[in-house]
């Protein structure tokens, strides 16, 4: 894990951490709701905000440094029969071989990441902001991170607005509120981006589809035999969400389901 941290993603992770704590410091130092609560001896609100920010940073590093589901070469040997049993015989696609790894057979729903130089199970996408892939093992934690990050950003947005001080002239107003306005702009942009990302991922999870499958459906061998309206991995919104967020059971993401029967094939 330590080697992974100091790889190419070190600069990105350091930038994220520095930006987060600089904005947090600005909100605490200016005349915002946080500062007023501190002056009045009401420390609960500042403490909760600090803990929320700290939690978002911890989740960021957890998702960033976590194994997303990298496939070892010897972990898929002898799995042909098991893989074929999950697919309807009439729709069995040609089992793929990765052209970059030494994998004899690339598991269904896996994809080779050109950045990480590895194949990832249930590949969703490679996220440049965490400098890691989002896949089978860290996808749910990625969504939890987005949710916590969005809560922290929206709260920071409210706190920044509470600190804007009116003045007599525009020049004086910009000088007094300059740092808060900069923080407000950064937080506002990131709030919209995170909200959009969270909404898209929750939608895709609810239909049991990955970003890669949604964007590249017509180029994926195991989806070519299905119409645009069909998703062979969809079991319904409730079952899809349960399978995705429930950590008490192991889910075989490669199982295909037909529309005519609720049982897996």
Image (tube, rainbow, N blue to C red):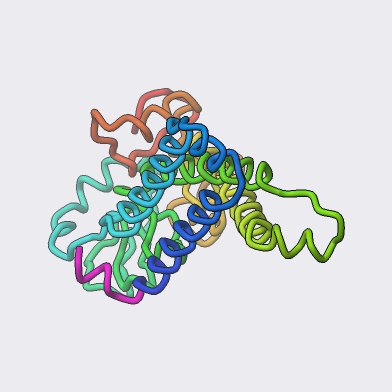
Residue under the point 37% across and 40% down: 88
Residue that appears at 38% across and 42% down: 140
**Residue 155 magenta-drawn?**
no
Q: Is residue 164 above or below residue 71?
A: above
**Residue drawn at x 30%, y 52% as measured from the top left:** 62
In depth, the one of 238 and 89 nearer the eye is 238
Q: Is residue 186 left or right of residue 121?
A: right
Height in image: 176 above or below 264? below
The magenta segment is 1-8
Q: Where is residue 64 in the image (x, y as percent from the top left)?
A: 34, 58
Task: Report the label total.
Answer: 0
Return the residue found at the far right.
169
**Which quadrant holds residue 170?**
bottom right
Q: Can residue 258 be seen in this view?
A: no
Residue at x 43%, y 46% (from the top left corner): 53
Query: Residue 31's spot in the image, x, y percent?
Result: 61, 47
**Corner quadrant of residue 131:** bottom left
State whether residue 164 is above or below residue 11: above
Q: Looking at the image, which is closer to me, 258 or 216?
A: 216
């Amino acid at each position: 894990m330590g080697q992974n941290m100091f790889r190419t993603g070190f600069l990105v992770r350091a930038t994220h951490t520095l930006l987060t704590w600089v904005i947090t410091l600005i909100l605490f130092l200016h005349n915002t709701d946080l500062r007023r609560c501190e002056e009045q001896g009401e420390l609960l609100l500042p403490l909760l905000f600090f803990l929320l920010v700290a939690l978002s940073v911890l989740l960021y590093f957890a998702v960033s440094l976590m194994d997303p589901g990298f496939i070892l070469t010897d972990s898929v040997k002898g799995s042909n029969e098991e893989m074929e049993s999950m697919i309807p015989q009439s729709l069995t696609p040609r089992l793929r071989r990765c052209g970059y790894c030494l994998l004899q057979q690339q598991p269904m729903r896996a994809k080779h990441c050109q950045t990480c130089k590895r194949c990832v199970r249930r590949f969703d996408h490679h996220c440049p902001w965490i400098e890691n892939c989002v896949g089978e093992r860290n996808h749910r934690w990625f969504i939890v991170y987005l949710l916590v990050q969005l809560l922290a950003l929206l709260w920071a947005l409210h706190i920044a607005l509470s600190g804007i001080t009116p003045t007599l002239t525009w020049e004086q107003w910009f000088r007094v509120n300059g740092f808060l306005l900069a923080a407000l702009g950064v937080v506002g942009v990131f709030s919209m981006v995170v909200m959009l990302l969270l909404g898209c991922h929750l939608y895709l999870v609810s239909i049991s589809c990955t970003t890669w499958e949604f964007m590249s459906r017509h180029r994926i061998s195991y989806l070519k035999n299905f119409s645009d309206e069909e998703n062979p991995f969809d079991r319904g919104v409730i079952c899809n969400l349960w399978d995705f967020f429930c950590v008490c059971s192991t889910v075989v993401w490669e199982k295909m389901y037909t529309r005519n029967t609720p049982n897996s094939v």
